[in-house]
């Protein structure tokens, strides 16, 4: 074998060996990456980055506090209606929590449910004049931010931005549906006597739309 052939053959062997070594190094790196990789299931608790607002977690944690706060602040409906009719600003100051346009009032009542429209029932309440329409929303859609605003303990400054602040309100509404309304057949309440504790925003004093935190069918 000539010296040139020997050198060429040796070069090929060295080249092949280099490729093998490089391939082995790549496999080692990939194996190390696999060992250091955690599989995250979408929707699991690990699928939320640390420090990122979780509406579901917020609702589960804060709804019991809001419920307790509304129950503590709740005023008898007849007493509240009389106070609003007599002096609305004074009633808002005494019983309400400021929330931009109109205060949020916490109220308790027992009444007979009338017909429902889109999950909202009219309620006949003793001691409240016929000129005041009282309604209660029971889902499936729960609208508004009354639960978020009812206690005065939840403020915009506690959140990163307006989106989170709005999501907090929705989270509380969703938790209400899960913790309270899911336990009741809300489609069959017409004609039944129901005791309610909830909150409404006082925009039109003759039209209350209550978001309940407690609803007991008698």
Image: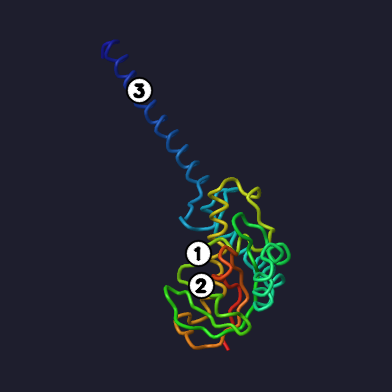
Find residue 167 and report its image quarter: bottom right
- Most foreground residue, 111 or 159: 111
Tell me whether circle 1 and circle 2 mark residues in contact (CB < 8 Å). Answer: yes
Tag 3 residue? 15
For marks 3 and 1, give the CA distance: 71 Å
The reply to whether callout 3 and callout 2 are in contact (CB within 8 Å) is: no
The structure residue drawn at horizontal position 56% and vertical position 65%, both measured from the top left corner, is 204
Near mark 3 (Cα within 10 A), the count class, few <14, some 14-19 or many ≥20, is few
**Horizontally, is 61 left or right of 177 in the view?**
right
Q: Secondary structure at mark 1?
A: loop
State how far apart marks 1 and 2 are (Cα): 8 Å
Q: Of all residues shown, which one is farthest toward the top? A: 3
Establish if 110 lies above or below 174. Answer: below
Mark 3 or mark 1: whose residue is earlier in sequence: 3
Task: Report the residue at 54% width, 52% height from top.
Answer: 48
Q: Which percent across, then down, holds residue 187?
A: 44, 81
Q: Determine which residue is flagged by label 1.
A: 143
**Marks 1 and 3: in contact by CB < 8 Å?**
no
Left or right of residue 117: residue 128: right
Q: Residues within 10 Å of mark 1 (few under 14, many from 20)?
A: few
Q: Compare marks 3 and 2 and give the one earlier in the sequence.
A: 3
**Residue placed at 52% from the left, 88% from the top?**
192
Residue located beneath label 2 in the image = 137
Where disc 2 sits, the SS reads strand
User: Residue 53: where, in percent of width, then height?
Assistant: 57, 51
């Amino acid at each position: 074998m000539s010296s040139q052939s020997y050198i060429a053959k040796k070069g090929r062997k060295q080249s092949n060996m280099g490729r093998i070594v490089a391939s082995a190094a790549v496999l080692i790196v990939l194996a190390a990456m696999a060992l250091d990789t955690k599989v995250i299931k979408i929707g699991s608790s690990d699928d939320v980055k640390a420090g990122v607002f979780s509406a579901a977690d917020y609702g589960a944690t804060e709804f019991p506090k809001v419920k307790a706060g509304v129950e503590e602040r709740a005023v008898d409906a007849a007493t509240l209606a009389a106070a609003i009719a007599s002096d609305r600003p004074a009633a808002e100051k005494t019983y309400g929590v400021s929330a931009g346009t109109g205060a949020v009032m916490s109220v308790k009542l027992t009444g007979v449910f009338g017909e429902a429209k889109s999950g909202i029932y009219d309620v006949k309440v003793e001691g409240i004049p016929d000129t005041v329409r009282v309604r209660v929303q029971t889902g499936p859609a729960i609208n508004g931010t009354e639960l978020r605003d009812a206690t005065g303990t939840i403020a915009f400054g506690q959140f990163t931005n307006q989106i989170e602040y709005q999501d907090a309100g929705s989270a509380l509404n969703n938790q209400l549906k899960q913790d309270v309304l899911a336990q009741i057949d809300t489609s069959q309440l017409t004609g039944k006597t129901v005791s309610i504790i909830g909150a409404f925003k006082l925009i039109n004093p003759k039209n209350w739309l209550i978001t309940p935190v407690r609803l007991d069918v008698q």
